[in-house]
Image (cartoon, rainbow, N blue to C red):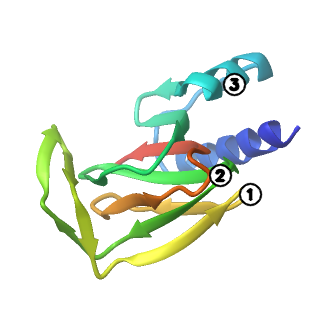
Amino acid sequence: MKVLAALTTALLVAGYVAAAGVPAKVTFVSHDKVTATMAKGGAIIEDPGLRVLAQRRGSGEVEVHDTTNHVFIIVEGEATLVTGGTLVGGKQTAPGQIRGSDVKGGQTHHLTKGDVITIPAKTPHWFKEVPTKTVAYYAVNIEN
């Protein structure tokens, strides 16, 4: 039920974004598919300009995306997410994406189940610490 509530939140955000000009259509994804996707990670919904992903991860590298805005909805675990500041050691790893080793001067957020955070395009973001080994979340990715 909690997974369904989080996905409903993600879809409501997607609807809001669609109203702002992102192409939209009605998309239904069953609970079974959402659960299976969360177990391995990957896309739940893929539309032009909008992707909803189920992610399960540990700490990682700093990321900056030129055109991708994120909404993260935490469904399990906890993590320290650093946003903003200045990327250190950045290298382009894909078109429109830079990854680095650290952030200087960013803002630290302690995220736990039920939290939601938005990250605008061009904003460094980094799951610096994941004390629960993994954090599970939905990522609503909206392209500019």
Q: Are marks 2 and 3 in contact (CB under 8 Å)?
A: no
* Mark sitting earlier along the chain (1/3): 3
Amino acid carrying label 2: it is Ile
Which of the two residues, 119 or 50, is positioned nearer the viewer here?
119
Q: Residue furthest bottom?
A: 105
Q: Is 117 situated left or right of 104 in this image? A: right
Residue at 47% across, 64% down: 81
Provide the residue designation for mark 1.
114
Q: Residue at x 41, y 68 (%)?
A: 82
Verify CB contact (< 8 Å) between mark 1 and mark 3: no
Kindly identify the residue that appears in the image at 74 percent across and 57 percent down.
114
Note whether residue 28 is visible. Answer: no
Task: Tell me residue 4's x, y (percent).
Answer: 80, 36
- Secondary structure at numbered mark 3: helix
**Percent from the top left, x then y, of residue 33?**
69, 17
Q: Is residue 125 above or below residue 22?
A: below
Between discs 1 and 2, the one toward the N terminus:
2
Give the vertical position of 110 relative to 125 (above or below). below
Residue named by callout 2: 74
Q: What residue is pinned by disc 3?
A: 34
Residue 90 lies, with reference to residue 1, above or below; the image says below
